[in-house]
Image (cartoon, rainbow, N blue to C red):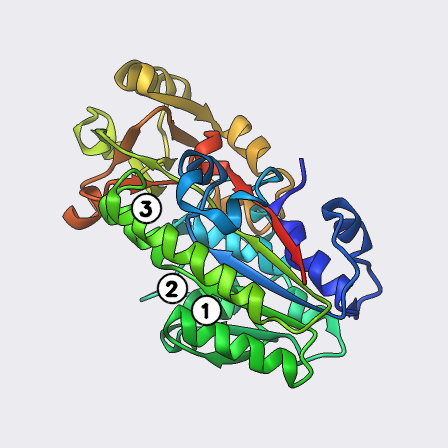
Amino acid sequence: MTELRQVFAAAAHGAGYRPSDGGSWAESAQALELPAASRYVVVLIDGMGLELLEARRGHIPFMRRRLGTALTSTFPSTTACAITSFATGERPGHTGMVGFTAREPDSQSRIQLLSFADSPVTPEAWQRCPTIAERATPSGEIVSVGPEKFRDSGLTRAAWRGMRAVFAETFEDRIGAVVRELRAGASLVYLYWADLDHVGHVEGWSSEAWIAEVERVDAALSSLASRLPKDTALIVTADHGMVDIDRRLDLADFSGSAALMSTGEERVLQLFFEPGTNAEQMLHDLAAWCGESVEVWDRTRLLTAFDPVADHVSPRIGDAALIAKGTWGISDSRWMSDANMRLVGAHGSISSAEVSVPLIIEHV
């Protein structure tokens, strides 16, 4: 199946950009079957999984007529991983963005990969892959439209280096900024919208609030399509979907938790064993404790999920992982906040509700 990481590379190729290192993005453009156009707009709606849209078809008249093509997000299916793969064309095993949080091997500290707050390393040092915008020639012309608060965020520095940023707050203002940039000569513009994901986390994707927000997104996309200059290709996708959690395990309640450090998020917890831990026994005990709610992966299976894995990324990946099934969440109250453990919507695991995202293309 075509991967999310191919979308921005395909749009860059269609817009006439070529990698400065001599590579090519033509294969991605062919895989997505992008139409030839004079300019391209790529919109990423955070948290808008394909299965979620299919379940709410009656509320999305613009997108409903264009659904059907599915893309595969990353493992883990979470924002830091997926957006960085989207922006670089590389999988998390290369970018090193291996979860919502990750362990820094030298300091053994836990880093939050959206903000890099209090991190012992910079986003640029952690995420070494050049971005598509950095590789693109001619350079410095790809435009990103988003909120001012992300100007120097950790994820912006890790994923969106090399872009010319334009800041606008409301969806309507961002649409206006996109149209102005295109009319001024931009051939590739990226627009990001986070509110649907936020509503899903707080209220759940099955809530009335989520339905209201997805209706707003659909109306905004319809408005954008109607205002685009002729011969523009509009590409809409998402970084991941989500599930609504109704049951939780807390790793702090596991009898062997003192020998474990966890990273990640509530749908995928990566585990690092203390030196001297009997790995086979630990995996056995974890499986018995988790029961049917969670898959327990050893390091070999975890590395396979991340494959390919760069040498410098390998130490950031756990000795094991707990992969949530169904509507289960896996907390670790030793470091997760009460607010985070009360969130309804969550993502990161391997269910199709989390991994499958839409590819919507409109050529105007």
In the image, residue 272 sits, relative to residue 135, either above or below, namely above
Give left or right: position of 219 versus 339: right
Question: Which residue is under mark 3?
Answer: 211
The quadrant where residue 292 appears:
top left
Secondary structure beneath disc 1?
loop
Secondary structure beneath disc 2?
loop
Q: Disc 2 and disc 3: Cα gap in Å?
A: 32 Å
In the image, residue 6 sits, relative to residue 342, either above or below, namely below
**What residue is drawn where x is 24% and y is 40%?**
344
Of labels 2 and 3, the one closer to you: 3
Residue 73 appears in the rendering: no
Verify CB contact (< 8 Å) between mark 1 and mark 3: no
Q: Disc 1 and disc 2: Cα gap in Å?
A: 7 Å
Verify CB contact (< 8 Å) between mark 1 and mark 2: yes
Which of these two is toward me, 190 or 129?
Answer: 190
Say which amino acid is labelled 2. Answer: Phe
Of the two numbered discs 1 and 3 on the same chain, state the one appearing first in sequence.
Answer: 1
Disc ID at residue 122:
1
Say which amino acid is labelled 1. Answer: Thr
Which of these two is toward me, 206 or 219?
Answer: 219
Residue 204 position, x and y percent, is 27, 42
Secondary structure beneath disc 3?
helix
Say which amino acid is labelled 3. Answer: Ile
**What residue is drawn where x is 67% and y is 65%?**
132
Disc ID at residue 69:
none
Q: Quadrant of the N terminus?
A: top right
Q: Disc 1 and disc 3: Cα gap in Å?
A: 38 Å
Disc ID at residue 116:
2
Residue 290 appears in the rendering: yes
Counting labels gives 3
